[in-house]
Amino acid sequence: MSVATRADFHRPAAVGEAVRLLAEHPEAVPVAGGTDLMVAVNYRHARPEAMLDLTGLAELRDWTDEGDAVRIGSGVPYARITAELATVLPALAAAARTVGSPQIRNRGTLGGNLATASPAGDGHPPLLATGATVEIASTSGTRAVPIGEFYLGPKRSALRPGELITAVTVPKAAGPQQFLKVGTRNAMVIAVCSFALALDFDARRLGTGIGSAGPVPLTAPDAEALDLPWSSPGRFDDALAAEFGRRVAAAARP
């Protein structure tokens, strides 16, 4: 016979209250969409002593246009990213479209994807390719972490005890972007490998992001340094494409 385990449940009404509760109850696990945590709970792989329900925090559940970038609240679900941000953040919207089922996309959040810090997370490659910034709050204030410094190891991040991811700021597309994902089937699958690409011809910048190819989501600096025909954009020749692919593959650390 199974015995239910008691867990405290906190439901803050504002971010300030949420970080105060986290400081007072360091054992509390933040929950927004719950699409990862609740699976672990249901299979008895996790038994949180306390949960911090973030669904009542309206300030986390919207996005704002910041001019050259978009600030996405950590509680914005994937479905809204796909529906509302595809024209300005095409790679991230494409990645959001591949996440799980419609039910998961309506519940799961970008903030949860970051907090879990799985190398296979679909949101990570486009955030790396575009040079996003993670906004983190605590009782000490707010700090910004460049996305390249956020991932520390498999399911380990720069998030400290008592801290809460509040938003992600993503530069708007200044050129073509793409996201590709390989899995064992065509839908509702964890990535075997994923890749994002962001081009900015005016700034002569090429950004990359690779998922499921190492202990953390990766970039391919050597591929980004490739000398591209920036002044005459068009279809790259086969030799250039092959060299780019070779450099991306060399960056993988499976």
Image: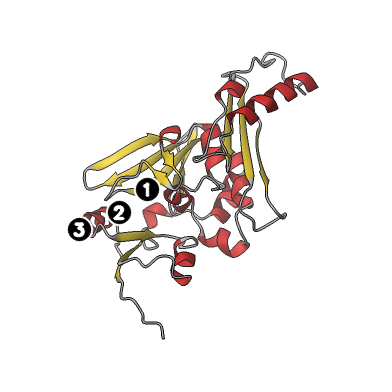
Q: Which x, y percent locates residue 55?
A: 40, 62
Q: Amino acid at mark 3?
A: Glu
What residue sits right under mark 3 in the picture?
Answer: 24
Real-space CA distance between mark 1 and mark 2, rounded to the nearest whole angstrom:
8 Å
Instruction: State the residue at coordinates (34%, 60%).
Output: 29
Image quadrant of residue 48? bottom left
The reply to whether dot 1 and dot 2 touch (C-beta < 8 Å) is yes
183 left or right of 212 in image: right
Q: Sequence-wise, which precedes: disc 2 or disc 3?
A: 2
The reply to whether dot 2 and dot 3 touch (C-beta < 8 Å) is no
Q: Which x, y percent locates residue 236?
A: 76, 22
Q: Sequence-wise, which precedes: disc 1 or disc 2?
A: 2
What residue sits right under mark 2 in the picture?
Answer: 15
Image quadrant of residue 174? top right
Label at residue 42: none
Which one is closest to the eye, mark 1 or mark 3? Answer: 3
What residue sits right under mark 1 in the picture?
Answer: 166
Quarter of the image with the N terminus in it: bottom left
Q: Which x, y percent locates residue 56?
A: 37, 63
Real-space CA distance between mark 1 and mark 3, rounded to the nearest whole angstrom:
19 Å
Q: Secondary structure at mark 2?
A: helix
Q: Secondary structure at mark 3?
A: helix
**Pointer 2 local density, CA inside 10 Å: few below 14, some 14–19, many at least 20:** many
Q: Nearer the viewer, residue 24 or 193?
A: 193
Q: Amino acid at mark 1?
A: Thr
Instruction: Give the answer, above or below, for where 59 lies relative to 237.
Output: below
